[in-house]
Image (spheres, rainbow, N blue to C red):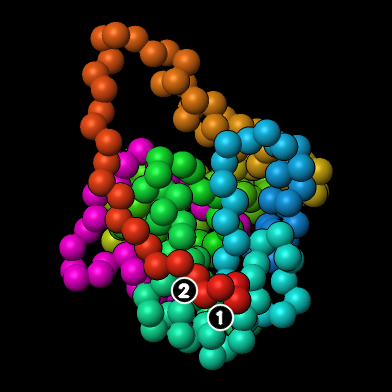
Amino acid sequence: MPPRASSLRRSGTRVARPSGQIVVVTAADTSALDFLLTAVRRRMPSTSLEFPKRITTRRNGLPDAEIWVNRSIFRDIDRDQRFIVTWQADGHSFGLPANIETIVEQGATAVVVAPAHVVPQLRDAFPSLRVINLADRLEAVRASLSPTARLQRIVGPKIAQRLEGRAGGVISAPVLYNGDFPSAVRVLTEALMEIERGLLQPVNCRSSQIPKRSKPTLRRSSALPAAL
């Protein structure tokens, strides 16, 4: 079943987004990314980044990353449009809950793990979306021979990015590591710290010449059931 964005396009209009953003951590194999992100969070105890949990029907997921619900509750949440996107994997359902919209609307940054094929849908609703596409160096060598890489060499990365977006491809250069877990932890930590430094930069560079932005009007999202 293809991924479906539910609450992103309510009433057919796009909601204006303030300065918050979503950072999607993805890879060719996402099975170890939850453990990886947990290790990274321990190295960033004072971070301002938010790490919301996804909802899933999988029972044996990492508690730091997922909230388990049965299939009936998952369908209820989906029917009530309280997911921003859903997908299927290995016979289980997964969804990013609508409270992520609240995080973004309040100007914060949410870091989530998701498969690459949901990135275009999220980017359509969150133009400031950032993608960290982890790949080991051997995968990167193989990727350089792919049709996508050849397209980038022919038309340039910007045009290729737009074309990939229309086709639903991953729109991100890989962040390389050496193929082992410690290397992946170090590289992902550095990437998230760099994003966080970029978010803090305007605060450290305040000036009377910088115009003040009006406070955005927040659109409230329905809360998840109390049982969650």
Is 144 in front, or is 209? 209
Q: Earlier in the sequence, mark 2 or mark 1?
A: 2
Q: Secondary structure at mark 1?
A: strand
- Residue 93 badge: 1
Is 60 in front, or is 214? 214
Q: Which residues are magenta?
A: 1-29
Q: Position of residue 60 (x, y in %)?
A: 75, 76
Q: Disc 2 marks which amino acid?
A: Thr
Furthest toward the front, the residue is 226
Q: Disc 1 marks which amino acid?
A: Ser
Q: Is residue 36 visible?
A: yes
| Residue tagged 2 | 86
Q: Secondary structure at mark 2?
A: strand
In the figure, 152 relative to 70: above or below? Answer: above
Circles 2, 1 touching at the beta carbon (< 8 Å): yes
Residue 24 magenta-highlighted:
yes
Q: Position of residue 19 (x, y in %)?
A: 36, 38
Residue at 47% x, 30% y is 199
